[in-house]
Image (cartoon, coloured by chain):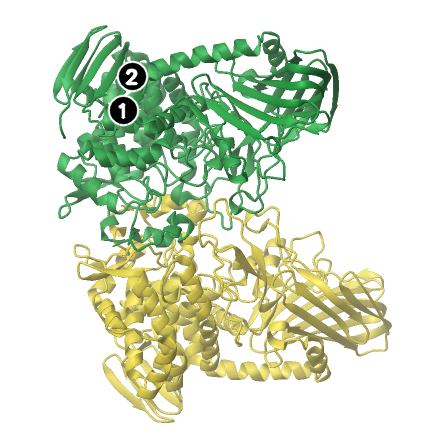
Chain colours: A green, B yellow
Amino acid sequence: MSWQLVNNDRNEEQLLVNESLFALGNGFLGVRGNFEEGYSDEKKSVRGTYINAFHDSTEITYGEKLHAFPETQQKLLNVIDSQTILMTINGRQVQAGEAVTMERTLDMERGLSIRVLSWHDEEAGKTTVTFKRLVSFTVKELFVQQVEIETEREASVHISMAVNGDVSNFSDPDDPRVASGHAKRLTIEQVDAGDILSVTCRTYESALSVHCSSKSAISVPAERTVSSGEGRAEEAYSYTSSGKAVLTRWSMYTDTYRHGDQLEQTAARLLSECGSFTEAEEAQHEYLKAFWKDTLLEIEGDPELQQGIRFNLFHLLQSAGRDAVSNIPAKGLSGEGYEGHYFWDTEIYMFPFFLMTRPDTARQLLKYRFSLLNAAKKRAREVGHTKGALFPWRTISGGECSAFFPAGTAQYHISADIAYSFIQYYLVTGEKAFLREYLTELLTETARLWMDTGHMKDGVFRIDDVTGPDEYTCIVNNNFYTNAMAQYNLKWAAACWELLEAKDAQALNQKLELEEGEIAAWKEAAERMYLPYDEKLGIHAQDDTFLQKKVWDLAATPKEKFPLLLHYHPLTLYRYQVCKQADTVLAHFLLEDTADEATMKHSYEYYEKVTTHDSSLSYCVFSMMAARHGDVEKAYRYFIETARLDIDNTHQNTKDGLHLANMGGTWLALVYGFAGMRVKESGLLFRPVLPKAWKSMSFRIRWREALLEVQLEKELVRYEALEGSLTFKHHDETISLKLGDTEEIPLRLS
Amino acid sequence: MSWQLVNNDRNEEQLLVNESLFALGNGFLGVRGNFEEGYSDEKKSVRGTYINAFHDSTEITYGEKLHAFPETQQKLLNVIDSQTILMTINGRQVQAGEAVTMERTLDMERGLSIRVLSWHDEEAGKTTVTFKRLVSFTVKELFVQQVEIETEREASVHISMAVNGDVSNFSDPDDPRVASGHAKRLTIEQVDAGDILSVTCRTYESALSVHCSSKSAISVPAERTVSSGEGRAEEAYSYTSSGKAVLTRWSMYTDTYRHGDQLEQTAARLLSECGSFTEAEEAQHEYLKAFWKDTLLEIEGDPELQQGIRFNLFHLLQSAGRDAVSNIPAKGLSGEGYEGHYFWDTEIYMFPFFLMTRPDTARQLLKYRFSLLNAAKKRAREVGHTKGALFPWRTISGGECSAFFPAGTAQYHISADIAYSFIQYYLVTGEKAFLREYLTELLTETARLWMDTGHMKDGVFRIDDVTGPDEYTCIVNNNFYTNAMAQYNLKWAAACWELLEAKDAQALNQKLELEEGEIAAWKEAAERMYLPYDEKLGIHAQDDTFLQKKVWDLAATPKEKFPLLLHYHPLTLYRYQVCKQADTVLAHFLLEDTADEATMKHSYEYYEKVTTHDSSLSYCVFSMMAARHGDVEKAYRYFIETARLDIDNTHQNTKDGLHLANMGGTWLALVYGFAGMRVKESGLLFRPVLPKAWKSMSFRIRWREALLEVQLEKELVRYEALEGSLTFKHHDETISLKLGDTEEIPLRLS
């Protein structure tokens, strides 16, 4: 059961949620789990096909626009639709809503979804229609569908399919968040209907083209007709037969970013190379076998959680961009929420999973960020900085897309978050080339930003007027998270230049033109970084004045007032000690050597009381820190909230797309939380614990050339080197394993 | 010369500026100084007629909209145009651009403007056309024009006039600030062309109607024709004559707010009661005689400054609403800048002039604010307050119209500013009825807001996350200005209940339902109000952390980077010690008993160094405080900046309308600055000084039943009771004057 998600609901609300849950993708292409035939009864649907990073620019309108507010936004576009397959059997429309039974399955082991409709037809007898679809991991351009139509007696069947370029993004006049314009951003460039149906569209402003070519085959003799018009190419089959007929349909998507001006040619070539549906299915299964083998992640004792974990990892895999222009949208490729933008979610919540299990993908994610460095330098100048790089809070192609700077541009920490993930990559892989080609330059430009943002005053380095991760407290001075992350950034920027070989340092200096004393200034700023601390409470203060504010009375706040941001003006929220999400506690997770154990524990306890978890980025952090501080059962309760957040639609907005950062957070909670893993400057570390409810938990990670399996059982932990050899710490104990070695150690009671 | 403003420039830029400078108004109706015939050469023009508070609602679009962001804005509308008078003489169009000479005069003594065009016509010989216009102070609905046409020889003259309802607000595609929509907000309801031309229009959303009826008369036999169409009613005269012909045109404006559903009837009645232009001129002159007599304000020794002062007072008089629905727009009725909204500008910068010279108008301005109290209570709930009234930062009819809350809604101090002006009114007039009917209720509801906004922590009362007057530092904790003003508000709220007679208190309590201990809590909050103070600098800190920030290097900032807000992202500005305008220094002016002399002087010196005066509300405050602290010559230099700011267009945006707050500031700088006047709880006080450049300065103010004249000369000050009797202080000396008494006192050298 845990390999599959089954949901047979046909009510409007769950259907919308299922469109996200059953979305298929491969990091390049994403197709929402819509029905081929659409819904009956004018039910709402977000019918969507997306190509990662394929966007248009749209104007941002402000009531009052100030200097350097972004003028345009990028918006991930719903592209050409090739999902549609309409059928009549004996003249009667095939509709899920009409079928007697519908069984719908997302198969995470094999990477496809299956939907079976069945009913009794007066003429044709027992009738079953089975839809299968997959978005290929091995041919990224390919979306392939198969329909099996089986009737008991002879029936007359008509099937029609379209490639439709006349598409829009979702807008809903009933929902102010998605009510406004910019829905239609594609013009039709070309439509063809022959052996292959094909449509090419172009964006209004960003001058990108997208193409879809589609071909089909049917297993029974049938009459085929084609037609075209209004941005659509259509084909239809008619046949009369009893028993089973199988239709297969291959659709290839190409775009300017990945295929230059060879959109149609590439699609045609790829179509010509396609094998059968079964072959595609097998390739998909092989690919996923490797994925599941490398990540493993099994828990014994809770199949529902196991299902949630698989679901979350599967969608992470489906969502991660693997090329130079794309990253991981906050909602993956499963919906239009957050306009397909990339946030810090990638670096802090999702990157570690890829780093430890699929370092090639991790590297690609970093290369994407690195490619934005020039845009980030330009943005820093616009805002008023004389040096350094300021990464945009949300973006696709590098421009700042946040239209509300207090919880957008002001989140300067994203630059340090990106720096942090670059450092983590280096710590895990030890790649010297990475140090030389990416790490040093990125850290130098972000360190420069901190030097220009902060300043030394009375012997401490202060960073004023930024927003930390907690969006219920904006524009503050000396946000602990930001200062601590900037400190790490500055320290490592200096360290990089010392790690570089002399000739590499010289070459890089040609480009980056270090000033006299610049590195020394970074070190000094890092050493003297102001990290606000409250003696009385024994905790780090979230910022200069957070602890002076009124404490929000969460217990007295009615349930329907959550999430608070939908019920209170931001100023009211800012005025209280109340957090949307982990902030100081997240800093303690990422940088555990910045504070002592007691401080981290007190901070965790203090901030827990004022945190609403209105952000889906919060639970996993509290789960990890609960585990860190010995409260395993609370860690488990927080973990549960992450594992099934989308499956159970606990945030009530899964219809807009999945919460990818939370999905990454599930893995973090397991590996960094229960297994207590840390990647430190001194190497890899584990401090494992196991919740009572589980019999065991196991997972695999890569560390340089090694593949390590960790199995946690009730009373012991077993480390096994499945590939290569490695050295790491279990608490304070150093463990070295050679290929095939196994080490069993009793679990400490916390 | 100082009674007149003359400007004969005909270049596009100055013409636009002159449209504001030559605007005429009476607090109800405002007409920009456009040319009757418009401009040639497609020169830009903001052709405008405005009725105070006559607005439509327009939608505010946000890139990202959060809870309780206002959804609509109010916009002062350009209403029906009755300025247009077109003429041909011997078939040739009369155009200022074509005339050989143009002389244009604003006569502030008589309250009208005159424009004389003259040239030599081949057939008609020497030709002169003289336009006069006035907006009546005695019949508020009346705009009256007179045109004298004089030709040397016989000429054929054609005159056409329109009442045009097909009007829009100004928009300019070249200027992003005024480029966008919402320009056209009136639909035509009715057009008539008979003896009277009349047009009625209605707003799209606010359901207000405006009407204009116009009639004309000409002194020579002429053929009259009328026509109508497209929202316009037109009439024309044709005649052939030599010598002089005089056309008079009366236009009456009525609107729903002031005339209910009797728009046309009222206008017709008023038109029927109209006398000649000369009679209107005389009534206007009489009205202004009284105005100038009561305010006096003369300086000897600087005619240019004297002109600036007269100009500023004249426009204050022209701009102040005198009825229950209107107030003083930030740009008066002279332009469309700030959408005709009312800000704190009224209470803090303009109200004192009216309070001390025209208490009836002052009272009316307060009654307008009082009428918004329910809206302010509603707004407080929207934002998240459980009690109290939060006044909108900018509004016409009571709804918050600020689309950028960090420098809008967050300026909570406006509620205390309004409270302050109510208290000042009470101190000056001593009206017990005002205490009972307005003051106590307003102070109670604003005090409640402060109690709900701030909180007691470690024995001090703190107010977090507000913005003070300085918009270069937003969303801060314990802004000194806000806290000090809130303290005064709270203290006086408590005092009011003690000043009330028992039966009045009881009656009011029925309505306001004081809670047990509520007054005591106000007193305690006031006593324990946290007023951030820096021991080392010996100054009050602008807020909790202002003095911890980097100091902006103003000397190193190139001139073209000012005003800073047009060149730096707000976050960059927030991050520095740099002020757009007086903040702490303003608090010291308003509440001089909150700090000792040394602190105020140090604050003045400190903040002066970090203030750009990018706001036109800044100079007057620094002028007053320079005078207060004995630097009279610097006070004089700041004063000069205020006195001619619009005449000399020093802020480069006078075309959008006049800077009314600065105009009030000119009067403040003279009376509160040089004459050192204060209205204190202990009574009226003067501490006069005189700049070297002046021989003398005199002015008059009202204090209860008294009219006091103050004459400052080189070495003495003369106080004279022109009406009634009064007691006041000159420094520490108590002076009592009976009607006709004069007291001369040597000036102190500072």
- Count of marks overlaid on the render: 2
Check the picture and name the quadrant holding the N terminus of chain B: bottom right
Classify residue A655 as left or right of residue B18.
Answer: left
Check the picture and name the quadrant holding the C terminus of chain B: bottom left
Residue drawn 28% across the image and 76% down it: B494
Mark earlier in primary sequence (2, 1): 1
Q: Would you identify the image quadrant in which residue A745 lies?
A: top left
Q: Are marks 2 and 1 in contact (CB under 8 Å)?
A: yes
Mark 2 = which residue? A701
Question: Does B274 sit above or below residue B226?
Answer: below
| Same subunit: marks 2 and 1 | yes
Question: Does A651 sit above or below residue A725?
Answer: below
Q: Counting other residues with Cα less than 10 Å from the Cα at mark 2, is it few (<14), some (14-19), or many (20 or more)?
A: many
Q: Return the residue nearer the eye: A2 or A555.
A: A2
Residue A671 — which label?
1
Residue A245's spot in the image, x, y percent? 65, 15
Classify residue B394 as left or right of residue B203.
Answer: left
Q: Counting other residues with Cα less than 10 Å from the Cα at mark 1, is it few (<14), some (14-19), or many (20 or more)?
A: many
Task: Find numbered disc 2 in the image and state the secondary structure of the residue it sits on.
Answer: strand
Give the residue type that dot 1 points to. Answer: Val
Classify residue A741 as left or right of residue B649.
Answer: left
Classify residue A696 as left or right of residue A259.
Answer: left
Task: Find numbered disc 1 in the image and state the secondary structure of the residue it sits on.
Answer: helix
| Residue B490 seen anywhere in this rendered image of the structure | yes
Question: Does A615 sit above or below residue B114?
Answer: above
Give the residue type that dot 2 points to. Answer: Ile
